[in-house]
Structure formats: structure tokens, C-alpha cells
Amino acid sequence: MNETRVFPARLADTAASCEDGRILAFGDAVREAAAAACAPTRAPRGDLAVVAVNGADARDFLHAQVAANLKALEPGHGVLTAWCSPKGRVLFLITVIADGDGGFRLLVAREQAEALARRLRMFVLRAAVTVDQLADHGVIALDDTGIPPSLPEDVLAAADAAGRTWLTGPGTSLAACWDSLPGTPVGEFAASLADIRRRRPRLAPELAEQFLPQELDLDAHAGVSFDKGCYPGQEIIARVRFRGSVKRRLAHLLFEGTVPPPPGTRLLAAGADTARGTVLLAAQRDAAHGELLCVLDLEAADVRLSDQPDVPLERAADGDEPDA
């Protein structure tokens, strides 16, 4: 078992719920869901892996590959952006973090890390760039805590535009500093709920090449640049923007039930079979209710899950989360 799978499982005690080396909850998942709505939290993110891009040409190389303007990304900061196909559809959602040595760490879904690293290497050509999976590294997400004042030297901290601080480093170092970090410990169930409420999308592998970056709201937080120059899919992405033809955006909905719908579940309008949206991420907030993040037609109303066509979904009020 490599370090990625050992961390964060090494943090778990007998009360924790774990799966495949990941902590789903440290104890009471409902209580953790409540904390994710109203208190600073810290969450080991076993669902994420780290890819390092280093070398004298690292910034120029990545800048030409992803949708964000990385020339403006300063050390200690991160941005959620996309690597797109030539047709402008998102292949990978990536949090890009700039380190202090001119390199970058890419946080990506664990099951996609190998594919991302392999595809990036195909475009290195003669550039002075190395692309490496850091199998011994883990990730911690801190919400509403700020950057801790003291961390091990080999742990990198970066803040993003949504009030989150990302910590990445060797799993042994993250485990060593875990108890001194601010925030209530929560597992991946509550971390998913936090992502939904922050409208921070995730993209399952089976949903690759289905959405424009704007449909994932990446243009709202510097995840897409329209004036930085060429990158894969840039022409189509810019054309959509300047023609004002984005027809779908992220939406935060509430559902009833005990089983969150999986990514890719279709959303239908009442009495119709035509898909009006797609679930990206869903999580329980209590024993009978949950929340989901989806891409939804802007004009869609009275939508339902495809496997529950008789149960309408409610929209979550912006800035007014339901009681957990």
C-alpha cells in the first residue's frame, strides 16, 4: 500500500468510518455535516492526489495547457481550473497551486492522477519541464481557518478564492501536524457537503468532455481567462463567452432520501424525458435529506431525479443553507 492510501487512514481512530484508505467520517457524520455548514473545519482529502510540475519552463508550459491565467498565480495561492479538449470541453478539473520555487502542484481526483500526468508528459516535448505523480503526498482542506502560522517545512499551504486553504505534502508530515491544525475534523462525507455549498464542482471520469468551463462556473473565480492567449479549446470557450450563449450553469438543489444520487444522474423536467441537467456531486446532510451540485439548464424549472420522477427537487437559497 503506498503512502497515498496510508494517509489519511493513519489519522483514523476506532470510531472512524473508513473505506479504501479514506476517512468518510471521524464519528458522527450528521454532526460533521452540521459543522461543515457553520464552523471552521479540517478534512483529509483521500479522494485527491498530487501531481508536480517543475522545471525552468513549468509556468509557461502549464499556462499554455490550462484555462486559467497562471502568469498571475502567486506562490501560496491556488486556482480551480480545467484542462480542456480541443472542442472546449473539460477533460480534467484541477486545483493548481504555485509553490515558492517556480513549480506547481496539481490536485486532481485520485483515480485521474495517472491519466493527467501521462497526458501532460505528451506535450512537454523539448521544454524544461518534469511531470511527476507524488504518490507519497496527501491533501488536507481547511475551510474558513486561514493559513496556519506554523507548518512542517515540506508542507505547502495555498489559499484559493473561495476561502479554502489547501495543505499538501508527504503523508507523514501531514499526519504529524494534523492535531495542531485549526478547525473541527470532518471526513469526506462532510467535505463533499462543503464543496456543494461552496459550488465547487467535481468531475467524475465518466463526465469528461461533457461541459464547457463556464457551465462549471470556472469563470466566476479566475478559473478561465479570455485574454491570455491560446490553450486547448480556447477558441470555442471564448466564442461562447462573447456570444453570450452559456445555457447551463451550476445549481445547488435539495433532495429527499437516504442514498445520494451518483454523479451522472440525469435531471428531468416534470412530465418529460428530456434531460435538463446532470448531477456532479451529492451528499447527505441528515438521515432523510441531502444536497447536490449539478449542471442545470438556466431555464429549467420543477426538475426531478430521473429515478424519482414524482419527487420535485427544491433549490437551495443562496447564502441561506438549510438547517443540518
Image (spheres, rainbow, N blue to C red):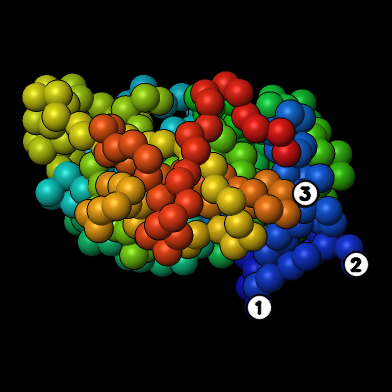
Q: What distance separates the C-alpha of mark 2 from that of mark 3?
A: 18 Å
To which residue does mark 3 refer? 30
Would you say 51 lies left or right of 30 here? Answer: left
Alpha-carbon neighbours of circle 2 within 10 Å: few (<14), some, or many (≥20)? few
To which residue does mark 2 refer? 14
Q: What's under tag 2, amino acid-wise?
A: Thr
Q: Earlier in the sequence, mark 2 or mark 3?
A: 2
Q: Tag 1's secondary structure?
A: loop
Alpha-carbon neighbours of circle 1 within 10 Å: few (<14), some, or many (≥20)? few
Q: Tag 3's secondary structure?
A: helix
Q: Looking at the image, do the residues carrying marks 2 and 3 touch, with CB atoms under 8 Å apart?
A: no
Query: Which image quadrant is residue 250 in?
Result: top left
Question: Can residue 198 be seen in the rendering of this structure?
Answer: yes
Q: Position of residue 251 (x, y in %)?
A: 41, 36
Q: Position of residue 131 (x, y in %)?
A: 38, 56
Q: Is residue 134 above or below residue 77?
A: below
Q: What's under tag 1, amino acid-wise?
A: Met
Query: Which image quadrant is residue 215 in?
Result: top left
Q: Earlier in the sequence, mark 2 or mark 1?
A: 1
Q: Earlier in the sequence, mark 3 or mark 1?
A: 1
Query: Which image quadrant is residue 241 in?
Result: top left
